[in-house]
């Protein structure tokens, strides 16, 4: 348990909301969301919902081989999404409403259409040749080493014109930048400076575990013990231990340099650096806060995405977080994003409510994925219409299901785009009832629950930066903890089971339910025992002895 007496920073007390712009709101009727669409929804985000910061997935110029994670220019906006002026208006509109804006930064790879790569591949002696990772075939013609692409197949692509291979940890259209080259570092750090000078409040740093690969390009050893690298099985990628191409020791130096750039802007900060770090060896994961807390402010914690959804596993994860995070480091939790099955599809709509209560009341910064506040589900896509390149490679729906458009109202395209336009991905069935407008009017909806949790959290020091104390001796299937700040005390009690559970709190003779996930118990006074109904979570204001 740790309690901070200092005034919390915005990224510690606040709630981050991830916007996947392609799927959020299409303002110009071409079937794809855009930045002007986000501007239209700023009032929703700040007033109706009440989040504190927006994280925008990439909007940079891009051939869209990986929907913007293949960047062709780090300092501009793709016409599909708008232009720099639209971005500035979005930023100003968010700031006027006291919301921060975090943008995605994609350091591991650029697009193969980026001019840097076009130059790099033009000849072996081009000054930018070493900006990417090129290697000769082995004398017998074999690949330079055994490294694999996370999207399938070898990580090497042969370039006929110059007779060498280049490295791509993701698609062949996403060549890996060579962060060992000082010019690359300078150019990439300058891109951060470009956006910081424009006024952004921080970065979500994509696939940061992939930069700084082994300089000698050594083969990864085989994975003989079946160790799974991340929270989901990747049979081919997991056939080796990613010793030389993933989360290497040299990554720490890069993170310190990135942090140094944020610190250059300290006079107008504070800024936040959030890293996409898929490392599930928790002590190693925590090392990316930095020994002097000088690396990432928040290494994204994807723990809740992979564990079994039961009280014991969730509690164990929280215990582990509280154990490994270095003193002064700040926790964070995530239930979903544009790469993961939706939480409501994974654990069911009733537990999705419990999960939202968990996310918004644990000690640490929560990140909500757009649509999860509505309890959106994964939306299936016919296999011959899959958009996600990873899905196309693997013959699956890939990540399309979790990227289906936001549901705004009951009009034919759910208010995502103009009614006669086909959205880039299908709209969820049942949108007539699941949409924002309908849920705002329904006092028992998932959106109402999310809004109430957000406003409760915002109003309470205990629930934002207060201490965390798990409660022992509770029934199986329940996870209960306290959040405490001085005399401000809350008990959060979650029932993961489909049966009721009776709880006793000898330490607290009385309390008042301020919120149930069922939204029907406000103000109920509790004495020494009370019952949690199936799939119910409650936030209880504890009245001191
Ligand atoms: C992680 C991003 O979240 C994902 O969408 C993308 O495909 C890869 N990194 C590659 O940039």
Image: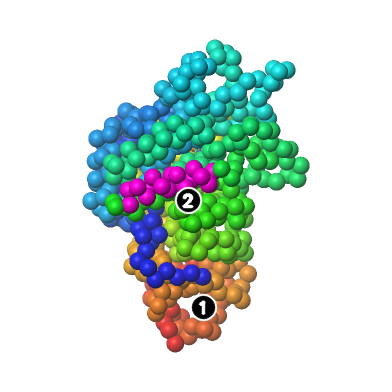
Please state, as top left, top right, bottom left or bottom right, where the C terminus lies in the image.
bottom left
In the image: residue 359, left or right of residue 39: right
**Residue position for label 1:** 530
Instruction: Give me the residue at 46% from left, 39% from top.
Output: 403
Of residue 512 and residue 122, the one placed in the foreground of this image is 122
| Mark 1–mark 2 distance (CA, rounded to whole Å) | 45 Å
Within 8 Å: ligand 1 and the Cβ of disc 2? Answer: no
- Which mark is first along the chain, 2 or 1? 2
Q: Are circles 1 and 2 on residues that touch, CB within 8 Å?
A: no
Residue 137, given in percent of the width and then of the height, sits at 65, 20
Of residue 240 and residue 333, the one placed in the foreground of this image is 240
Q: Which residues are magenta?
A: 251-266
Of residue 95 and residue 397, the one placed in the foreground of this image is 95
Q: How many marks?
A: 2
Residue 393, given in percent of the width and then of the height, sits at 58, 28
Q: Residues within 10 Å of mark 2 (few under 14, many from 20)?
A: many
Q: Residues within 10 Å of mark 1 (few under 14, many from 20)?
A: few
Asked whether 252 falls inside the magenta stretch, the response is yes
Instruction: Give me the residue at 53% from left, 46% from top.
Output: 252
In the image: residue 292, left or right of residue 89: right
Residue 269, given in percent of the width and then of the height, sits at 32, 52
In the image: residue 510, left or right of residue 92: right
**Residue position for label 2:** 295
| Residue 367 in the image: above or below residue 454 | above
Residue 430, given in percent of the width and then of the height, sits at 43, 45
Instruction: Give me the residue at 57% from left, 64% from top.
Output: 323
Instruction: Give me the residue at 55% from left, 38% from top.
Output: 212
Q: Main secondary structure of the magenta part?
A: helix
């Amino acid at each position: 348990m740790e309690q901070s007496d200092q005034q919390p920073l915005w990224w510690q007390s606040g709630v981050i909301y991830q916007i996947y712009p392609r799927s959020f709101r299409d303002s110009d009727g071409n079937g794809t969301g855009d930045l002007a669409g986000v501007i239209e929804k700023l009032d929703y985000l700040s007033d109706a919902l009440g989040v504190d910061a927006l994280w925008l997935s990439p909007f940079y110029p891009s051939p869209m081989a990986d929907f913007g994670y293949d960047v062709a220019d780090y300092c501009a906006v793709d016409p599909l999404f708008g232009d720099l002026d639209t971005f500035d208006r979005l930023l100003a509109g968010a700031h006027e409403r006291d919301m921060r804006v975090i943008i995605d930064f994609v350091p591991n790879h650029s697009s193969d259409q980026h001019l840097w790569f076009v130059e790099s591949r033009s000849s072996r002696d081009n000054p930018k040749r070493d900006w990417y990772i090129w290697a000769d075939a082995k004398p017998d013609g074999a690949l330079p080493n055994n490294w694999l692409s996370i999207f399938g197949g070898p990580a090497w692509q042969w370039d006929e014109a110059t007779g060498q291979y280049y490295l791509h940890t993701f698609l062949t259209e996403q060549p890996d930048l060579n962060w060992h080259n000082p010019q690359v570092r300078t150019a990439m750090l300058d891109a951060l400076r470009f956006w910081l000078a424009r006024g952004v409040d921080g970065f979500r740093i994509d696939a940061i575990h992939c930069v700084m690969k082994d300089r000698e390009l050594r083969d990864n050893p085989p994975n003989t013990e079946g160790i799974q690298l991340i929270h989901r099985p990747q049979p081919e990628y997991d056939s080796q231990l990613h010793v030389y191409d993933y989360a290497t020791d040299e990554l720490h130096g890069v993170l310190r340099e990135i942090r140094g750039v944020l610190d250059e802007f300290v006079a107008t900060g504070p800024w936040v650096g959030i890293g996409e770090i898929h490392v599930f060896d928790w002590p190693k994961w925590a090392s990316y806060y930095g020994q002097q807390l000088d690396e990432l402010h928040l290494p994204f914690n994807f723990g809740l995405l992979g564990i079994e959804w039961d009280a014991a596993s969730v509690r164990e994860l929280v215990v582990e977080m509280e154990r490994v995070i270095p003193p002064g480091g700040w926790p964070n939790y995530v239930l979903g994003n544009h790469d993961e099955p939706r939480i409501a599809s994974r654990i069911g709509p009733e537990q999705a409510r419990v999960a939202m209560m968990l996310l918004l009341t644990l000690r640490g910064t929560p990140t909500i994925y757009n649509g999860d506040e509505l309890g959106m589900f994964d939306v299936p896509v016919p296999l011959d219409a899959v958009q996600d390149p990873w899905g196309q490679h693997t013959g699956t729906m890939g990540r399309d299901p979790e990227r289906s458009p936001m549901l705004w109202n009951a009009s034919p395209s759910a208010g995502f785009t103009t009614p006669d336009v086909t959205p880039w991905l299908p709209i969820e069935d049942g949108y007539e009832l699941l949409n924002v407008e309908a849920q705002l009017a329904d006092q028992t909806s998932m959106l109402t629950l999310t809004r109430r949790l957000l406003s409760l959290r915002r109003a309470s020091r205990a629930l934002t930066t207060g201490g965390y104390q798990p409660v022992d001796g509770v029934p199986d299937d329940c996870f209960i903890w306290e959040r405490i700040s001085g005399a401000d005390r809350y008990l959060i009690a979650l029932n993961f089971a489909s049966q009721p559970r009776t709880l006793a709190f000898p330490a607290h003779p009385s309390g008042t339910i301020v919120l149930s996930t069922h939204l029907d118990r406000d103000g109920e006074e509790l004495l020494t025992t009370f019952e949690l109904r199936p799939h119910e979570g409650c936030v209880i204001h504890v009245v001191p002895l």
